[in-house]
Image (spheres, helix red, strand yellow):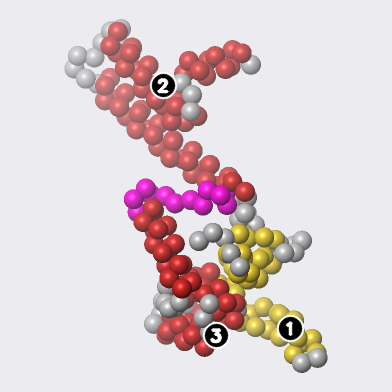
Amino acid sequence: MANELIPASSEGQLLIYEDGSLRVQVRIDGKTVWLTQRLIAELYQVTVPTVNEHLKGIYGEGELDTAATIRKFRIVQTEGVRMVARMVEHYNLDAILAVGYRVRSARGTAFRKWATARLSELLVKGFTMDDDRLAAGRTLGDNYFDELLERIRAIRASERMFYQKITDIYATSIDYDSGAEITQTFFATVQNKLHWAIHGHTAAEVIYQRADA
């Protein structure tokens, strides 16, 4: 599902969700998005009563907790010739996605195909990413690219512990000879793999770069 989140205010509290010809105003609060039943209906191209019916089923079956997924926001809207401010219930991303798994519409089907593809990628690869959004910085207010880098560093650190354990086992072998050429080659190879796992350079490349600095 190609989509785009475009800031619609200087405070970044309202965004526009775009997908082809569809434009839905999305409210951002607490690192999640919030939509009214009317906007959820527009998103999945169904009627408001259909959305209401699915939400009743979702909450009635205990799939989601109302206190955690429903919040009232003040909305100013035109009623006749007057501008009226009312507190209107909004539903967070968990509720929006839950409705997407239940609605029977072309857009609901497209959503389920997209979600299934992301889940399959996660199960097979162990990760899933929206490359375009991360590259363009289109996130919900935070720079998740930095978080991604930090998690990759943590994974690489675990690789370092793995290689350290290999060298420890090798050093305890009965025919271990610290001066043997095969031993020197082994440790040099492991060291290069360790350096590459952490920062993407071999030991020789690190020395060269620092000497040239």
Q: Are marks 2 and 1 in contact (CB under 8 Å)?
A: no
Kindly give the residue lying farthest to the bottom in the view shown: 80
Q: Are marks 3 and 1 in contact (CB under 8 Å)?
A: no
**Residue 17 location (% of width, % of height):** 62, 65
Can residue 17 be seen in this snapshot?
yes
**Disc 3 secondary structure class:** helix
**Disc 1 secondary structure class:** strand
Which residue is label 3 attached to? 48
Q: Residue at x 29, y 13 (%)?
A: 183
Pointer 3 or 2: first along the chain: 3
| Label 3 to label 1: alpha-carbon separation | 18 Å
| Label 2 to label 1: alpha-carbon separation | 64 Å
Which residue is label 1 attached to? 77
> Counting other residues with Cα less than 10 Å from the Cα at mark 3, is it few (<14), some (14-19), or many (20 or more)?
some
Q: Between residue 140 and residue 150, name the one nearer to us.
A: 140
Query: Which segment is the magenta one?
Result: 123-134
**Disc 2 secondary structure class:** helix
Q: Residue at x 52, y 75 (%)?
A: 44
- The amino acid marked with disc number 2 is Asn
**Residue 159 location (% of width, % of height):** 39, 34
Pointer 2 or 1: first along the chain: 1
The verdict on residue 181 being magenta is: no
| Label 3 to label 2: alpha-carbon separation | 60 Å
Which residue is label 2 attached to? 192
In which quadrant of the rendered view does residue 6 lie?
Answer: bottom right
Q: Is 75 on the left-hand or right-hand side of 83?
A: left
